Structure formats: C-alpha cells, structure tokens
Amino acid sequence: MNIWNDPKWARRLLVIGWFLTSISTVMVIAAIAGIVNERHFIRTATKADAIVVEMVERSGDNGPTYAPVFTFTDHAGHEQKVYSRCSSYPPAYRVGDKIPVLYLPAAPRNAQIQGFFDMWGWMTIVGGLGVVYGIIGPVLLIVVRRQRDKSSQPSDAPSATGGQ
C-alpha cells in the first residue's frame, strides 16, 4: 500500500504538517520572548555569591532529581534563602558549593543561579524543538502535495505491458 496515493493518509499527513508548522511558530515565539525577558533580567539584576545549603529531592519522570537550595545576602544586608527552579540528576551542586546568583533588588526571593541551564535551559529546549518542528512540518507539507500532484497527473509514458 502506498500511503501517498491513499487520500485518508494524505489528509492526515497534511494535518500533521500544518500542526507541526503552527506549533513551531508558537514555540519559537515563546523562546524568543523568554530570551528577551532573560536579557532584560540580566541587565537589571544584581550579582551575589551564594552558598548551597541543601539539596532537595524532586520526583522526575525517570526517577529523582535534585534542586539546590541556596542562601545569599542581598543589597540591604538581609539573608535570603532560595529554592532553585532547576533540578538535575546527578545533582549539579553539593552542599557547601559557592555559586554566583542574579537577583532583582525588588524581588531577591526570585534569585536564580547564574548558569547556562538555569538561565537559558527551557528557551534552548523549546526553541530547538520549535526549529526542528519548523523544518519537519513544511517539508511534510511539500512532500505530500508533490506526491498528490504527481499521482493525479495522467501518465504520458508508454505502458510497460507492451504498447509501442
């Protein structure tokens, strides 16, 4: 069975192609918005040195992951304790590690670790998948349409069953 000549499969593949193309646009826009927001945060944030005081276990899809809890002294001299949003397995940090953090003076409890994945991780994943879907979707649309057009054109070639 040739799925390209089956109208049901062609319709399904077109829907998948349009879905991937559409969702890729949303994903890339979300990643760009996140990048713009993160760059603004970096420009306006204050840097501090923090100490990892605890590792909190979180349940993940493939088992436990570990998120650091860190403390630092903000610009007003108050000690802040922050639970990182990012977790990993194996743990990226150990209790006692000194780490750089960024925070907004108006919201020091929202401090984040100054590391690639902590700052850019979700944008890299969402943007990367968006780019991949943005390639697969249009390619699928083009291939399905070309195959559909090819199968709907009358054949001008002589038949292989003996006609000259």
Image: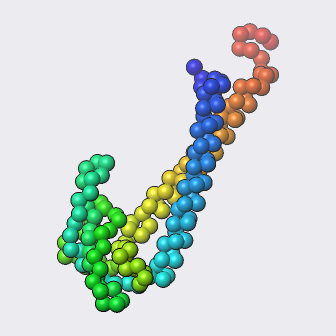
- Front residue (pair 50, 139): 50
Q: In this view, does 24 lie above or below 118?
A: above
Residue 10 rendering spot, x and y as whole percentages? 64, 30
- Colour scheme used in the picture? rainbow
**Total tally of numbered discs in the picture:** 0
Furthest-top residue in this view: 162
Residue that appears at 36% across and 89% down? 75
- Front residue (pair 158, 19): 19
- Front residue (pair 58, 125): 58
Question: Where the C terminus falls, by quadrant?
Answer: top right
Residue 133 rendering spot, x and y as whole percentages? 55, 48
Q: Is residue 31 visible?
A: yes
Residue 65 rendering spot, x and y as whole percentages? 26, 57
Q: Quadrant of residue 158 in the image?
A: top right
Q: Can residue 140 be seen in this view?
A: no
Q: In this view, does 102 lie to the left or right of 44?
A: left
Residue that appears at 23% across and 63% down? 56
Q: Quadrant of residue 5 in the image?
A: top right
Residue that appears at 33% across and 79% down? 100
Q: In this view, does 48 lie to the left or right of 156?
A: left
Question: Where the N terminus falls, by quadrant?
Answer: top right
Residue that appears at 62% across and 25% down? 8
Q: Is residue 106 left or right of residue 78?
A: right
Q: Quadrant of residue 161 in the image?
A: top right
Furthest-bottom residue in this view: 76
Residue 14 rendering spot, x and y as whole percentages? 64, 36
